[in-house]
């Protein structure tokens, strides 16, 4: 029995004693879930608690499917499904209840299953089920879950009064064209009789079920337990309603469709109503009315994360985002009625919608241009044919006489709606919405905005819902400087770049609203993809665990996600095949950043194709780290040219490896020893011939030449290779073994230079006329190139402006940290190019 509350509090306006908590099916999947819910209830200190429960997850669907199976005469299916329902509930009871309670519950369960079986038999006989029968069957889930929970809670809360209250004896409804209408007078009387003004304790109540005017069991419609909760809150004059579910509140979009959706802190009743109407399944639209009437706050909370604050729904929430959510309704048909005869004829809309009303069709959205030449409206796709027939019948005369030319139906549509009270306050929401559509290539077929300006909705092709939701969500919620990044080739440079990104991305987000999201990493064999972003602190382990075989097409498509405003691939390989893909990537809307020299030093025709693609697509392409690692060489060259200077000559030491070799080699220690030592220190390519051949330097010279506007091919560069002809084709080991044979010649060169007061340097030269050479030279000891340290690169630009004294850029030109930093700076340059204020 319920205990009596203190008399002083009873019945007064101040005595809003009850709190109503509703637990959805998603919170009641199994015995563990029941325990979790009881833990939450145990924390609630309210002396008067009404707990409204849904059926266990999926049970209502199963019950409704049973009726459909019986209509099809499939009684075997029914029996199997009934057995599953019985054993599932009995198993929960086994786990949670003591023997006596368990037996009592199972006896009731079995008797209900028996009733259901007879009901289904009857349906199978006549092969059809009325709504009464459907409602009767569908409501069993709530009866079972709530009885089970009441028994469990009663035993667990020995000190608190726990009572199961049959909602069917309380809520009286009358079904009408707008759904179930609560009979408030009768329901209030029932409440007074069954609960009483002074009652206290814990009431456990089945949601979803109610009684109709004949006293027969009915339901409040799908997802109706939310509505039950707010009806009980009104009847009990509750202080608050808490709806417990499996997400941490109302999200800015359906998390199943938009991975970036975030919890909305607060909503007005009207906003929540619109969101619910336009498809946010987290709350039932009718839930709002009883709460609004009594100004009862509703909070949506997460059973699985009870510490989180959730979403508060009240009359006047704290000012927040202007757009609170983006929703969609699938399976919609768009009906377009067109005809010059409708212009200026009063009452056409009235006739049209009157007809639809009579046919029992619910119109979801209406749009009419001011010319009145056409009216279009959206209805559920399942009612499309019915709607078309009704309209054709009602306007048969006008159709015959040509005043109405066409009634066109497109059943494959969906509606996307943007909701927020703030849209009336601030301008530009519609602009943002349609710009997002345009960018994602989505066509809005019909548009409606209510005069309240709380909602803008658009009818689109049903196949594009996900794309549309993501694009619109990004436009309203993401930083406009969000970059979807794919890194190809996380080797020496790539992995250091990922470390650098990891350490800096938080600061860049905070200070510049720049959101760098590495969403894909690809090695030569595997790839790792993430919806939002890969955790860079842990990417290697993650790739090992969750990586999949490399599929570059899928990798690219993933990085090119339409819903993120900008996308870039960072190619950290040295691979010509990957470089060959840049043009395609650019055409697909991706920017490219790379330290890979292969694209810019490829055959001119191919290079031009890539440059054309870049121009046509408006893509950005940065490759500073292809020459001189992180040194600003390309940038300097470009600045000189763009400001109208004329480059006369470029000369430099462009290989960190060769710089090192000749900084160390002075004829003392044999050259072959210096090479082996450099290799051991990781300063050469795995095959030192790649450096010694001079081809790497030649490529860099081609890149600089093309930057100058020269039509230079790799073959045009005169290259003096330091690899003796006899050692070009052997293995690396053999090369290293036979290299000492050349030491005498190299030592002689060095000795000769020293005698003349000179040093040996491997120098690249390029003139405005296009002469390009790469060779081992003897330079005076006082020359700028003679006095560099370790792996320093140095480049001299002789130009019209810098002619007496050349412009020199010098500094370390190799090493993972500086090269990765060069790539990183390119990425930031790209971000600045898309508007980030860095
Ligand atoms: P319950 O069983 O608790 O009533 P529902 O499944 O009816 O739960 O509703 C919660 C689900 O609604 C969430 O798991 C989520 O996937 C979905 N959903 C759709 N749109 C939204 C939204 N805008 N905000 C939160 N959840 C949403
Ligand atoms: N169990 C019912 C349904 O699934 C009601 C609810 O859970 O809200 O529709
Ligand atoms: Mg629900």
Image: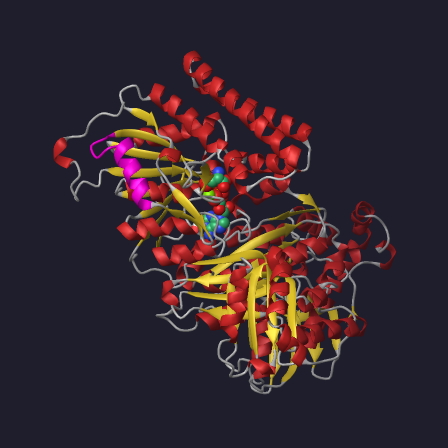
Does the magenta segment cover residue 188? yes
- Quadrant of image for the N terminus: top left
Left or right: where 250 falls relative to 409:
left
Where residue 213 appears, x then y in whole percent? 41, 41
Q: Quadrant of residue 617?
A: bottom right
Dominant secondary structure of the magenta stretch?
A: helix
Residue 513 visible in this rendered orientation of the protein? yes
Where residue 169 appears, x then y in whole percent? 36, 33
Q: Classify 350 as above or below 16.
A: below
Magenta-highlighted residues: 184-200
Q: Quadrant of residue 386?
A: bottom right
Give the farthest residue toward the top.
Answer: 99
Closer-to-camera residue (516/403):
403
Residue found 86% across the figure and 54% down from its top:
729
Give the farthest residue toward the left.
Answer: 8
Where residue 92 appears, x then y in whole percent? 49, 23
- Quadrant of image for the C terminus: bottom left
Residue found 66% across the figure and 33% down from its top:
125
Does the magenta segment cover residue 146? no
Closer-to-camera residue (443/22):
22
Q: How many marks?
A: 0
Q: Classify 221 as above or below 820.
A: above
Closer-to-camera residue (830/424):
424
Q: Classify 628 as above or below 171.
A: below
Q: Quadrant of residue 274?
A: bottom left
Residue found 54% across the figure and 83% down from its top:
343
Where residue 285 appears, x then y in whole percent? 42, 52
Residue found 83% across the figure and 58% down from its top:
724
């Amino acid at each position: 029995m319920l205990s009596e509350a203190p008399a002083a509090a009873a019945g007064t306006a101040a005595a809003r004693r009850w709190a109503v908590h509703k637990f959805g099916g998603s919170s009641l999947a199994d015995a563990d879930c029941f325990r979790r819910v009881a833990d939450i209830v145990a924390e609630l200190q309210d002396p008067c608690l009404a707990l409204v429960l849904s059926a266990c997850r999926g049970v209502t669907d199963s019950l409704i499917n049973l009726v459909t199976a019986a209509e099809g005469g499939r009684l075997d299916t029914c029996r199997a499904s009934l057995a599953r329902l019985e054993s599932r509930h009995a198993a929960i009871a086994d786990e949670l209840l003591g023997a006596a309670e368990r037996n009592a519950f199972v006896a009731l369960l079995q008797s209900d299953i028996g009733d259901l079986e007879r009901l289904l038999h009857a349906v199978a006989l006549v092969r059809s089920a009325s709504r009464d029968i459907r409602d009767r069957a569908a409501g069993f889930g709530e009866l079972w879950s709530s009885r089970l929970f009441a028994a469990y809670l009663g035993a667990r809360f020995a000190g608190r009064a726990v009572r199961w209250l049959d909602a069917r004896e309380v809520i009286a409804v009358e079904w009408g064209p707008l759904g179930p209408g609560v009979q408030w007078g009768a329901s209030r009387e029932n409440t007074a009789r069954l609960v009483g003004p002074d009652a206290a304790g814990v009431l456990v109540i089945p949601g979803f079920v109610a009684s109709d005017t004949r006293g027969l069991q009915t339901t409040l419609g799908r997802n109706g337990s939310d509505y039950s909760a707010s009806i009980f809150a009104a009847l009990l004059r509750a202080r608050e309603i808490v709806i417990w579910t499996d997400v941490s509140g109302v999200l800015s979009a359906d998390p199943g469709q938009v991975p970036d959706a975030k919890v909305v802190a607060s909503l007005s009743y009207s906003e929540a109503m619109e969101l619910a109407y336009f498809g946010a399944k987290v709350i039932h639209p009718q839930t709002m009315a009883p709460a609004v009437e009594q100004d009862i706050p509703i909070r949506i909370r997460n059973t699985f994360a009870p510490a989180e604050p959730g979403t508060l729904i009240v009359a006047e929430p704290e000012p927040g985002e202007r757009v609170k959510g983006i929703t969609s309704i699938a399976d919609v048909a768009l009906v377009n009625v067109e005809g010059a005869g409708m212009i200026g004829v009063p009452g056409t809309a009235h006739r049209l919608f009157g007809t639809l009303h009579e046919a029992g069709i619910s119109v979801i959205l209406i749009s009419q241009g001011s010319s009145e030449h056409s009216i279009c409206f959206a209805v559920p796709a399942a009612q499309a044919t019915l709607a078309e027939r009704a309209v054709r019948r009602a306007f048969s005369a006008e159709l015959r006489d040509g005043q109405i030319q066409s009634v066109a139906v497109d059943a494959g549509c969906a509606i996307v709606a943007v909701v927020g009270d703030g849209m009336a306050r601030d301008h530009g929401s519609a602009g943002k919405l349609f710009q997002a559509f345009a960018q994602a290539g989505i066509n809005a077929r019909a548009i409606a905005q209510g005069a309240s300006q709380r909602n803008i909705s658009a009818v689109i092709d049903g196949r594009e819902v996900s794309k549309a939701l993501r694009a619109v969500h990004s436009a309203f919620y993401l930083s406009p400087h969000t970059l979807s990044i794919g890194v190809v080739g996380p080797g020496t440079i790539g992995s250091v770049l990922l470390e650098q990104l990891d350490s800096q991305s938080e600061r860049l987000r905070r200070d510049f609203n720049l959101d760098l999201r590495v969403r894909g990493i690809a090695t030569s064999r595997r790839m790792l993809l993430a919806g939002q972003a890969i955790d860079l602190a842990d990417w290697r382990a993650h790739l090992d665990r969750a990586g999949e075989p490399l599929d570059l097409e899928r990798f690219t498509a993933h990085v090119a996600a339409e819903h993120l405003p900008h996308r870039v691939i960072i190619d950290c390989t040295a691979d010509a095949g990957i470089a060959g893909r840049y043009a395609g990537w650019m055409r697909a809307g991706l920017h490219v950043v790379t330290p890979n020299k292969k694209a810019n030093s490829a055959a001119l025709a191919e290079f031009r194709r890539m440059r054309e693609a870049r121009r046509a697509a408006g893509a950005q392409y940065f490759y500073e780290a292809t020459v001189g690692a992180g040194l600003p060489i390309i940038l300097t060259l470009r600045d000189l040219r763009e400001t109208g200077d004329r480059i006369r000559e470029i000369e430099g030491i462009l290989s960190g490896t060769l710089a090192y070799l000749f900084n160390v080699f002075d004829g003392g220690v044999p050259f072959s020893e210096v090479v082996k030592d450099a290799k051991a220190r990781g300063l050469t390519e795995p095959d030192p011939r790649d450096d010694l051949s001079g081809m790497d330097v030649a490529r860099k010279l081609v890149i600089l030449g093309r930057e100058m506007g020269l039509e230079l091919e790799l073959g045009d560069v005169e290259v003096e290779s330091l690899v003796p002809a006899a050692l070009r084709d052997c293995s690396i080991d053999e090369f290293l073994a036979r290299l000492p044979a050349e030491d005498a010649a190299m030592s002689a060169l060095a000795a000769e230079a020293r005698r003349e007061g000179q040093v040996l340097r491997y120098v690249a030269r390029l003139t405005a006329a296009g002469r390009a050479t790469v060779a081992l030279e003897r330079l005076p000891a006082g020359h700028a190139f003679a006095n560099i340290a370790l792996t320093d690169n140095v480049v001299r630009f002789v130009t019209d402006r810098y002619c007496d004294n050349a412009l020199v850029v010098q500094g370390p030109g190799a090493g993972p940290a500086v090269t990765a930093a060069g790539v990183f700076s390119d990425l930031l340059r790209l971000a600045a190019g898309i508007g980030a204020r860095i």
